[in-house]
Image (tube, helix red, strand yellow):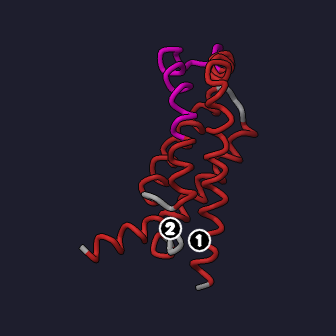
Amino acid sequence: MQNKTSYLIIRLAIGISMFGHGLVRLPKLETFSQGMLKSFENSMLPEIITLPFSYVLPILEFTFGLFITIGLFTKQSAIVLSGVLVSLIFGSTLIESWGAITAQLIHVAFFAYLINNIHDNSFAADRLIRKNKDIN
């Protein structure tokens, strides 16, 4: 039971972190996108890559952060967000934002924990779905 409680605490914390990132960025998506473009204007990453990513990022954070928070498609959502964070780490290296990388690496470590310990994901919508499939 202790592992399941720990898993729940970590899942909620990282899920709400990602969900919150997306939640606050979505209403100001244009401003967020322009800020991201400005951050990368002197990097080797072309705008043709940065611009679409700046619009998709908050949607991914919001959607998959929500999924992790409620425990829906937990493993798949953690994998998707790990990929997003690896992309962010790459981008942070290109603009030499070394401080941001620390927080991004911590997020990745928590997602790795969720993926590796998915068997402890008890208090989750995934469990409800699995029970309903077992009944039918």
The quadrant in which the N terminus is found is bottom right
Q: Residue at x 66, y 40 (%)?
A: 21
Left or right: 20 in relation to 49: right
Classify 10 Å Cα crowding around label 1: few (below 14), some (14-19), many (20 and above): many
Residue located farthest toward the left when viewing the structure as drawn: 136
Residue annotated with mark 1: 7
- Tell us which disc is closer to us: 2 or 1: 2
Left or right: 65 in relation to 102: left
The quadrant in which the C terminus is found is bottom left
> Is 57 one of the magenta-colored residues?
yes
Q: Viewer-proximal residue, 1 or 96?
A: 1
Distance from label 2 to label 1 (Cα)?
Answer: 11 Å
Residue annotated with mark 2: 124
Q: Secondary structure at mark 1?
A: helix
Q: Secondary structure at mark 2?
A: loop
Evaluate if marks 2 and 1 touch, with contact meaning CB atoms under 8 Å apart.
no
Classify 10 Å Cα crowding around label 2: few (below 14), some (14-19), many (20 and above): some
Amino acid beneath label 2 = Ala
User: Residue 28: which numbered mark, if any?
Assistant: none
Q: Residue at x 53, y 35 (%)?
A: 59
Above or below, comparing residue 79 to residue 40 in the picture: below
Q: Where's residue 82, x and y in %?
A: 51, 49
The residues colored magenta run 40-60
Residue located farthest toward the right when viewing the structure as drawn: 99
Left or right: 53 in relation to 103: left
Above or below, comparing residue 14 to residue 91 in the picture: below
Amino acid beneath label 1 = Tyr
Q: Where's residue 117, x and y in %?
A: 50, 71
Q: Where's residue 96, x and y in %?
A: 70, 30
Quadrant housing residue 73: bottom left
